[in-house]
Image (cartoon, grey):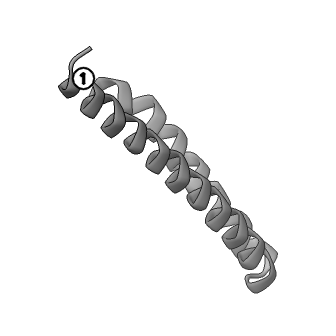
Amino acid sequence: MTEENYEVCIELLIMIALVIIVKFFNTVFFSGLIGYYSEVFPTPVRSLGCGFTLTFGRLGTIIMPYY
């Protein structure tokens, strides 16, 4: 292997590590946010918000393969 291949490999490993770290903190943040919102908002508002987000999330997963 040449030195250029090692540089590409190191850059790829750094990028993968950063993506894993960002996904971890994203998951932790949104888990905490869900717990916070369940205490702040009343049940009817919370259920309406969850329904909208689930609906649009599923529509996004259906539409996304066509883009």
Quarter of the picture holding the N terminus: top left
Residue 62 quadrant: top left
Instruction: Please tell me which residue lies in front, 32 or 12.
Output: 12
Q: Position of residue 58 (x, y in %)?
A: 54, 39
Up-down relation of residue 63 to residue 46 (above or below): above
Residue at 38%, 43% in the rendered image: 15
Residue at 47%, 39% in the rendered image: 59
- Position of 22 compared to 6: left or right? right
Q: Position of residue 57 (x, y in %)?
A: 52, 46
Up-down relation of residue 28 to residue 16 (above or below): below
Instruction: Please tell me which residue lies in front, 18 or 49.
Output: 18
Residue lying furthest top = 1
Residue lying furthest bottom = 40
Up-down relation of residue 26 to residue 14 (above or below): below
Quarter of the picture holding the C terminus: top left
Instruction: Please tell me which residue lies in front, 23 or 49.
Output: 23
Residue 32 quadrant: bottom right
Q: Amino acid at mark 1?
A: Asn
Residue at 59%, 61% in the rendered image: 25
Q: Position of residue 26 (x, y in %)?
A: 56, 59
- Position of 1 compared to 40: left or right? left
**Residue underneath mark 1:** 5
Up-down relation of residue 39 to residue 9 (above or below): below
Q: Position of residue 7 (x, y in %)?
A: 26, 34
Residue 35 quadrant: bottom right
